[in-house]
Image (cartoon, helix red, strand yellow):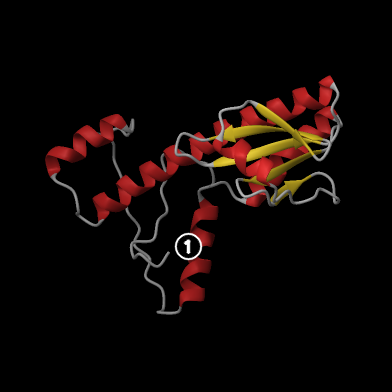
Amino acid sequence: MLSNNVLQSVIDGLKAVTGRELSVLDAEGYVVASTSEDAPDLLTPEIRDFVSSRAESIVTEGRRFFRAEGENGDCYLIGAAENDEEALTAARIAASQLEGLMNAYRDKNVKESFIKTLLMDNMLLVDVYSRAQKLRIENNVPRAVYYVEAMNDPETNTSILEVLKGLFPGKEKDFVTALDEKH
């Protein structure tokens, strides 16, 4: 799942370009990001039916919603407050953008999981090369591993992990991961 900050950033950028009010709802109908302060949660049967259907869009509460689905099954609804052609185009663009982001985050998480499994030595050597090739990770390049051990304080461990992840934002070849299952 994408963070609410990422979702908010995407629709804020689209509002700056299109001038249209947009909102993003999760699959339950709760607003997770919006360019308007009065975007209502829509916990209605119509929204739940739309999420499970294959329909392209739905109009409810005077708003048109489009679905953005990732390959792993995550689903968001992108709504336009207005119902004119420009607003609908902005919502369609937002849905397409979110689908691309969800798939990119999924790919990053799959690679991170592979690296974690590799570091924990939970993979057969014969599987390492084939899985690395499928994930488009080069196998004949120099690598470095930094092992950081923090005090046994969950808050400290979480903040250290976030600081380290901030050192390598958005890079495809750098992985920051916790090796225990708590983080």
Residue nearest the observer in this picture, 35 or 43: 43
Classify mark 1: residues with Cα within 10 Å, few (<14), some (14-19) or many (20+). Answer: some
With respect to residue 21, does 154 lie above or below?
A: below
Mark 1 lies on a secondary structure that is: helix
Q: Which residue ends up furthest to the top in the rendered image? A: 85
Image position of 132 (left or right of 160): left
Residue annotated with mark 1: 161
With respect to residue 111, does 43 lie above or below?
A: below
Residue visible at 81% across and 40% down in the picture? 61
Residue visible at 82% across and 27% down in the picture? 87
Q: Is residue 174 visible?
A: yes
Q: Is residue 144 visible?
A: no
Residue nearest the observer in this picture, 142 or 84: 84
Quadrant in which residue 108 is drawn:
top left
Identify the image quadrant of the C terminus: bottom left
Residue visible at 62% across and 27% down in the picture? 96
Q: Which residue ends up furthest to the front in the rendered image? A: 45
Place of residue 38 in the rendered image (x, y in percent of width and height, measured from the top left)? 86, 50
Place of residue 28 in the rendered image (x, y in percent of width and height, measured from the top left)? 62, 50
- Number of numbered discs present? 1
- Please, what is the three-letter code of the amino acid marked with disc 1? Leu
Place of residue 152 in the rendered image (x, y in percent of width and height, measured from the top left)? 40, 79
Place of residue 105 in the rendered image (x, y in percent of width and height, measured from the top left)? 49, 41
Image position of 111 (left or right of 63): left
Quadrant in which residue 130 is drawn:
top left
Residue visible at 51% across and 35% down in the picture? 70
